[in-house]
Amino acid sequence: MSEEKRVDNAKTVYASGCKALTSLEAPNAKTVDARWCEALTSLEAPNAETVDASGCEALTSLEAPNAETVDARWCEALTSLEAPNAETVDASGCKALTSLEAPNAETVYASGCKALTSLEAPNAKTVDASGCKALTSLEAPNAKTVYARWCEALSLDKIKSPVARKAEAFIATELDSLLHAGGRYEETIKPEHWNCHDWNNCPMAACFGVTKLEDIPSEWQEKAQMFVRLFDCGFIPMPTTESANSATS
């Protein structure tokens, strides 16, 4: 049996795990916990400061215009999320999400939002858009950290962020000499290394034949460290056969 709830005067609402709950209105609540309400389709918390709707797989409408923290992880049916005053927004795993507005958020997690095509986070310091396969534009002009791994449709020039510009400069001026520095270039550019992000088999491990940064010759450590940072963020693509040939010709 479906169930609807309106709690007019409550300041704190705990409804986590209410599997039959389909609608929740908490107009005066400051904190709303609706985790894992599997049948919940609508959540209204206009004055809440903290909203946790993670795991609400059927949720299609979430209104929390004044929330400072919005957790909407794994809300697989959610197509639009507006959090105009949030400082932290987590929409990871929202597979159907096509619109995310968080203009004031300092931290935005949108990993695994496979339908998201555009992401604007003008005030964010950290943005995680890894696995957003349809993403073609990412604007984070103030972000110090941006993760864009596995964003198959996103090119580096479409990422508006200082770290992306740093990556472009590194690729243009430092990358080729670094990849040749260990005398193992042909091994270094093999695909299995570029699909690895740990020191067991990553490109820098292959390049220098080491298992940790400290074992790289000191004159290359700083550049190798920069490579690792940019590579882990998804900013350095695997060299193509054509680029490898031109670099060695």
Image (spheres, grey):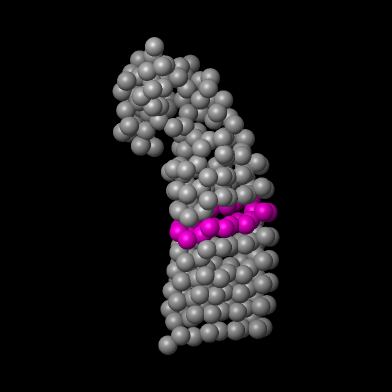
Residue depicted at x 68% and y 66%: 66
Counting labels gives 0
Q: For this view, does 166 lie left or right of residue 184?
A: right
- Magenta-drawn segment: 88-109
Asked if residue 102 lies in the magenta stretch, the reply is yes
Q: Quadrant of the C terminus?
A: top left
Q: Report the front residue among 180 and 153.
A: 153
Residue depicted at x 50% and y 71%: 59
Give the percent coordinates (x, y) of residue 204: 39, 27
Asked if residue 145 lies in the magenta stretch, the reply is no
Give the percent coordinates (x, y) of residue 20: 44, 82
Work out whether 29 lies above or below 143. Answer: below
Q: Quadrant of the N terminus?
A: bottom left
Work out which residue is located at the far bottom of the displayed protein and give it: 1
Work out whether 76 lies above or below 165. Answer: below
Give the percent coordinates (x, y) of residue 163: 58, 35
Give the percent coordinates (x, y) of residue 46: 67, 72
Work out which residue is located at the far top of the displayed protein and give it: 249
Question: Residue 86 is drawn in which quadrant?
Answer: bottom right
Q: For this view, does 112 lie left or right of residue 160?
A: left
Examine the rendering and report whether any part of residue 34 can be seen: yes
Residue depicted at x 51% and y 53%: 116
Q: Report the front residue among 137 and 123.
A: 137
Examine the rendering and report whether any part of residue 210 can be seen: no
Residue depicted at x 53% and y 84%: 4
Work out whether 212 lies above or below 109. Answer: above
